Amino acid sequence: MPASLRALAAVTCAALALQASAQPTPDAEGGLPDMPAARAPSSAELGVQTVEIPRAFMKDAEDAPQTLTAYWIAPAAKAPAAGAPVVIALHGCSGLYTPSGTDARALGSRYRGYAQWLRARGYAVVFPDSFGPRGKPHGICTERLAARDIDGAVRRADILAAMRWVAGQPGVDARRIVLLGWSNGAQAVLEAVDGSRAWPADTPPVDRAVAFYPGCVAAQKRSDYRLNAPLLLLAGSNDDWTPADHCQALQAAVLARQPQARFELDVFGGAYHGFDGTAPVKERSGIPSRRRHGTVTVGGDPAAREAAFAKLAAWLDAPRP
């Protein structure tokens, strides 16, 4: 089947999935779950649809792939009349997949867990894959920072392409597009909400954004960095991969330039990189870093995880953050 027809078929499947009616999955007390379930559902259980975003949407990347692969999850309930809000979720430097594969069946448990949690709250979710279409499906974590060809500009271009694609789908509310990213994907969020850069006229605005433990150095170094959307940034005080002090300095600089900006920063005491997960804390080697000679500490923190999801829920539920 030609690529154009595959893309059309994928878009049609996503639209049909969005319009399907189902009931949200309540917790044991009948309410929405506070956090993702201990066992993330499979991609099949989530109804993940693979979509191919055509190159025509990727106007901001000089070397864009022919199509940008993404994974679409419809909300658990029928969309309201105005359409469903959408979260564009942005993977970290390891990419979207487990080592077992490079398709929807191999989506990592973190991403499947978040998708379940978000769809129960009425959101559609789309995960653009910035690495697979560029030949690096399992990530760039071990690449030297200066040598990476998939950089912030590339990931920003993918975000813009995903936003244009989302805006053209039936049954969505293009006024309520949320950006949510982790680590390298959170750095992409910072690139996208940089208000010092011109925003393309054919792209809907970001309603609000969430960045989990981004590297803030690049944004901090920009003397005119400011926000074009409300931003919630969540970091761990013990993070030795993407230290929180740079994000604190970034917040201070932005608020000095934009006193009315909505830039909320929460730093969780004692938490490491990846604190919102459930994996045990461990050292990870082979990571280019400004500290500890390539060894960083990663892992979940139950208290920080619970607090972060409470903050995330409040941020998403607020009429205006």
Image (cartoon, rainbow, N blue to C red):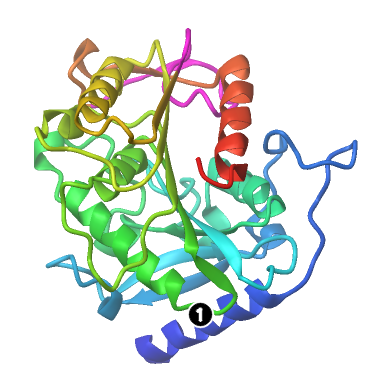
Please report the bounds of the magenta region as a residue range.
267-287
Q: Is residue 3 magenta?
A: no
Q: Residue at x 24, y 60 (%)?
A: 157
Tell me if 91 is positioned left or right of 60 in this view: right
Counting the numbered discs, the total is: 1
Name the residue at the top extreme.
Answer: 270
Name the residue at the front extreme.
Answer: 260
Q: Amino acid at mark 1?
A: Ala
Q: Residue at x 82, y 60 (%)?
A: 23
Q: Is residue 220 above or below residue 10?
A: above
Tell me if 93 is positioned left or right of 84 in this view: left
Residue closer to the observer: 65 or 105: 65
Residue 287 can be seen in this image:
yes
Please provide percent x and percent y for residue 293.
19, 14
Residue 317, quarter of picture = top right
Please provide percent x and percent y for residue 69.
39, 67
Q: Residue at x 73, y 69 (%)?
A: 78
The residue that label 1 is drawn on is 10
Please provide percent x and percent y for residue 167.
44, 72
Please provide percent x and percent y for residue 21.
77, 71
Residue 151 can be seen in this image:
no
Q: Residues within 10 Å of mark 1 (few under 14, many from 20)?
A: many
Residue 61, quarter of picture = bottom left
Secondary-structure class at tag 1: helix
